[in-house]
Amino acid sequence: MKRNIWLLVFIALVLVSMTCPAQAARAIPASNETSTLIVEISAYADGGLRARTDMALCQGNEDLRDNPPLNVSGEGVNCIVYQEHTMATSGSIYYEKDVKVDTGNQIDPQNNLNTVRVIDFSASADGSPVGNLYSTESTSVSSMSTSANLDGGGVCCPWGAPDGGVLPATNDQVTAGSQVNLYEGEITTTSSARTTAASTEEPVELTYSIDLGPSNQVANATAQGSATGYVEAQLMEGNGDGTMESTDMGYDQSITVRGDNIELAMAVSFSSGGT
């Protein structure tokens, strides 16, 4: 007997200090020169399709070329990494994807990375039941910095925080993504990330979502195969301008469905920093 399977997961990770600014992962100001990259893809095939995207964006407030190690007096590096690998064989495939990367300073709700992807795959729509779709996708943000005493001079402007005070050390990394192996089904995924801003009061953020359901190519179809959504987080925060570690949090979550009638919805939201 077939059973409908539906899972909805919403995960929010928030690390914010209410007493002084930037006690967690903090945005780094952009370089003098910034760039914007926009990619729009629309593809269809009866047979096979392969798609690959690998993107890494790192912004530092000193010289990235001599890292590691970071300078012990307030050097920071923030990175966004996005990857997608998709392969479909012996079926009918609709594939659409939009990617925007902006290396400039961002203010909420604007982001350095935005992605939207829709894939509709049917092994039977081309008249043959043979075929499958395999796809993996992930988005991650990392924020690493040593402590900085802004009252000590020399490290104010690289952090975009001219009002003085102490920026504690931080080492945060969050990754969210999905993996599907389908015979029939449609997946919609979105992601966004922000790590670059003119002020440390602007939060570092990541979002990721996946929505899996039946293919629109076959009447009365069900999604068939397997799908996994996941999020991994490691958050380590300092206190003061020394090497003290005051927060250590690890989080690992995964959801998997498999069968002849599956549905999966997952949303992840991470925000760190601010006042």
Image (cartoon, grey):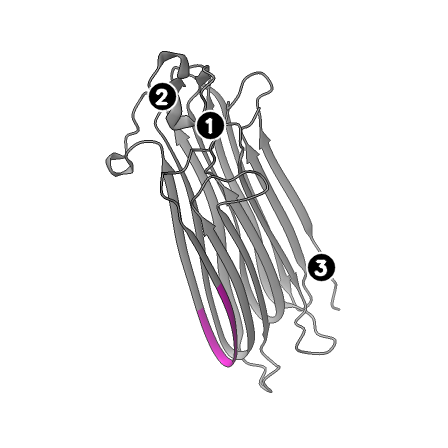
Mark 1, residues whose alpha carbon is within 10 Å: few (<14), some, or many (≥20)? some
> Which of the two discs, 2 and 1, sits closer to the camera?
2
Classified by dominant secondary structure, the portion drawn in magenta counts as strand
Residue in view at x 68 percent, y 69 percent: 214
Residue type beneath disc 1: Met
- What residue is shown with label 1? 236
Residue 243, by quadrant, is top left
Lower position in the chain sequence, tag 2 or tag 1 = 2
Residue 60 lies, in percent from the top left, at 36, 35
Residue 109 lies, in percent from the top left, at 59, 42
How far is the residue under mark 1 from the one under mark 3?
36 Å
Residue in view at x 36 percent, y 12 percent: 152
Q: Which numbered circle lies on residue 155? A: 2
Element assignment for label 2: loop
> Which of the two discs, 1 and 3, sits closer to the camera?
1
Mark 3, residues whose alpha carbon is within 10 Å: few (<14), some, or many (≥20)? few
Residue 66 lies, in percent from the top left, at 24, 35
Element assignment for label 1: strand
Tell me which segment is drawn in magenta.
40-50
How far is the residue under mark 2 from the one under mark 1?
22 Å
